[in-house]
Every structure is written in C-alpha cells, then in structure tokens.
Amino acid sequence: MREQLPFGLDDVKRWNGTYPTPFYVYDAEGIRNCVRELYDAFSWNEGFKEYFAVKATPTPGVLRLLASLGCGADCASIPELLLAECSGISGSSIILSSNETLPEEYRAAAKLGAIINLDDITQIEHMEAACGIPETVCCRYNPGQFSNTNGIMGHQYDSKFGMKPDQLLEAYAELRNKGVKHFGLHAMLSSCSLDENYYPNLARELFTLVLRIHKVLGIDIEFVDFSGGIGIPYRPEEKAIDMMKIGAAVHIVYDELLTANGLSVRIYTEMGRYITGPYGYLVTRVVGKKHIYKEYVGVDATACNLMRPAMYEAYHHIRVLGKETEPAEITVDVVGSLCENNDKFAVNRGLPLTDIGDYLVIEDAGAHGHSMGYNYNGKLRSAELLMETDGSVSCIRRAQTPEDYFSTLDVDTAFTAAKAESII
Ligand code: LLP
C-alpha cells in the first residue's frame, strides 16, 4: 500500500458521475516515476530494457504509456502479442515468454520479429517446424535449487518452467548448429519477492551460467532476462524494496563475474507487479451490511473483478474514502455478491464504521488485478480509467455490457440486446 492515495473522495464522486462502480483507476504519474527509477537503477548497463509483463495489465492505455517510456512487452499468447503491437511495441521489443507453446504462437511471434523464449529443449523442434529458426533465441533456465524461491512460484524442483542446466547447454549448442546468431538467457525463480537480495542472487546464478556457456560452448550470451518477480508491499507493515540499491548490487555482481572476464550482456527485466501493482486501485461501493455470526460489508465488486484474495488469500489494503482518519474499530469481512464463500476482499479486517454508499478503495490492484477477471455468475468486467496528475481520467477500457457477454454465445443477440434494454 502507498502512504497516501493520489486521489480523494471528491475525485471519485466526480468520476462516478460518468463511470459506475466498480471501476479500476490507474495513476499514470506513479507508473511513470516507477519506470524512470527502474531505468535509473540499471543505467550503468548499456541496453537495459524493461519488457513489461503484459499479463499484469493488458490494457493498451497502460501499454502505450509504458512504450512511451521505452518499455517493451513480454507476451504469453497471440492476443497479448496483438496488444503489444496495437500499443506501439513491435519487433525485438517483444518477447514471447510462453510455455506449452502452440505452432500458431511461434508463427505469430516470428512474423512480428519478436524474440522467442524457449521453455524447454523439445521446443526447438516445435519452433523449427512452426516458423523455422530465428536469428535470436532466448532459453529459460530452471536451476532446480535456488535460495530466494518463494510462495507463488514454488520450489524450483516442482516448477514446470525452464530447462535443467545440462539441457540448457545442449539447447544452445543445438540452436547454434541450426544457425541461431544471438542468444539470450531467462529465468524467473521467485514471485512477489520483497527480498532485495533476490535480483543480485539471480544475477550471480545467471552470470555464472553465462560464463560457463562461454567457456564450454564458446557462445556469448547477449542478454540476460531477470523476468519479473519483484514484490510490492501489500501489507502496511511491509516495506517497499529500494530499486536503486538492487541495481547497484547487481552491478557489483556483473563487474565481478562478467566485466572481470571480458564479457558483457544487456540486462532485461519483465516486471509486471512492480510497475503497475501499486498504482492501480479497484473502487467499489458498499451495497449491504449484514450481521449474522460475523459482520459483513457487502460491496458491488466481486472476485470477478479482483480474484487475488479468493485465489491466494492475498492481502489488499482497503480504505474507506472520506473516513481515512476514523478509527478502524469494526472487524468485518468485506464481501462480493458471488455464490462462492471465498468471494471476500478481506476477512476479519478492522475498518471504520461504514455506511451503504461509502466508497471503498482496494489498493495494489494494478497488476494481476483486472487481468485475472472472469465472468462467473454472469458478472461483467469493469471499466479501467487512467488518471493524470490534474485528477482528470480517461477511460482506457469500458465496462463490459450484457451485449459483450452474449456476443460469443449461440443466441439471437438482437433478442438479448432488446431484452436487456427493457429490463435494465
Ligand atoms: N515474466 C514471466 C514469464 C512471467 O510468467 C511473469 C509472471 C512475469 C514476467 C511478471 O511477473 P511479476 O513481475 O508480475 O511478478 N497471478 C499471480 C502472479 C503470477 C505471475 C505469473 N507470471 C498474482 O496475482 O500474484
């Protein structure tokens, strides 16, 4: 959570005049400052580039902003490749980091000139059959054991991602024999890590491997992709990481292992959560209050809008707008309206006394928030707004309508549209 929200009750009331709750709002300036700091932290590395993980916030309004700051895109599907393209990100500024990749996905990536990141040695054959052998290929690494692994990613032995060290070397040799000219190395060994040693330790692991590949195969890896995995402080007691410190610590490892051995690589990252997570908010209104064995505050958002609490029991801080200074004296569950008992944004959370109509802001929802939305119970996905520093917003994704919902179904859409109009 951030110390202060970049907007207040009056702003939300104004926006709500046009956009019904629930809606997402992103703080453009917050995102800009975050990206600038990331580039500053790695400015010592020539060619450093952030390939934003599109899955975190797959909205062109956000991707265009990131493109304007020099970011590329990390994509995992054809629609994500298209999202990058229509946001002005193209060619080698796109990485396809997928697994169990389909022939049409290789083909699409190759046609766009995107970098393909292979998750497994068997993918060489699949890729070749689908689109031939590109000049540049990246390979994803799984060391089996790694000191900083945590929760969402799981233990590396149990992780489905990447190749074992011996497979990785074999893959590079095979790719070289098939004509690949430029090589990259990729690994994502943690998720939501607030440990400032994660990237320096990952750098040590990967740069050591770069050296080994150089010595054993005579192949010079040109870029090393740390992927994402940097965490954000969801809970009030957690502390944000210091990116400048991390960049400096990686620099030391770089000089020790690469510069000292006459090698150099471009560092790439594919952060999602760190870039947009803290700068996106889900705004919802209290629609019901219920007292049974516990106190419930019901809101008009559901897990369909933000599934992280239901899926991972993830903590998202909640503020009651206009009541920020009131004591958090009531212990409540904040719940949505799904027919699912895990549709809870907070369990046993202290909040000020709320009233029906109050606006709640669910924080740190900017990454893996709207993007993980779904339509269970026929719930429609919300709008996304982009806020500028003057408090104005632009709608970068309109809310779904019943018409959108019915558009893929085997029904008479004119009938459902007319019905919808007569009852809504
Ligand atoms: N690159 C690759 C290949 C990835 O698979 C991911 C995330 C990222 C980059 C971005 O990672 P980030 O910087 O956002 O940690 N749904 C979960 C997160 C799953 C992450 C999946 N991969 C959540 O809501 O916490």
Image: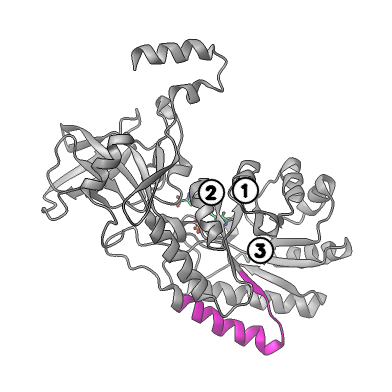
Residue 277 in the image, given as x and y percentages of width and height: 41, 55
Instruction: Report the residue at 49% width, 75% height from top.
Output: 41
- Asked whether disc 1 touches disc 2, contact meaning CB atoms under 8 Å apart, the reply is yes
Is the residue at mark 2 in contact range of ligand 1, meaning its CB lies under 8 Å from it? yes
Q: Quadrant of residue 402?
A: top left
| The residue stretch that appears in magenta | 245-267
Query: Is the residue 102 above or below the residue 327 in the image?
Result: above
164 to the left or right of 321:
right
Colouring mode (rainbow / by chain / secondary structure / one colour): one colour
Describe the element under mark 2 as helix, strand or loop. helix
- What is the three-letter code of the residue carrying label 1? Ala
Q: Mark 2 and mark 3: span between their CA atoms? A: 20 Å
Instruction: Report the residue at 81% width, 61% height from top.
Output: 135
Q: Main secondary structure of the magenta part?
A: helix
Q: Residues within 10 Å of mark 3 (few under 14, many from 20)?
A: many
Residue behind mark 2: 55
Mark 3 or mark 1: whose residue is earlier in sequence: 1
Residue behind mark 3: 141
Residue 193 visible in the shown view: no
Q: Mark 3 and mark 1: span between their CA atoms? A: 17 Å
Instruction: Report the residue at 46% width, 60% height from top.
Output: 275
Residue behind mark 1: 76
Please name whichever residue, 51 or 314, is drawn nearer the observer in this view of the structure.
Answer: 51
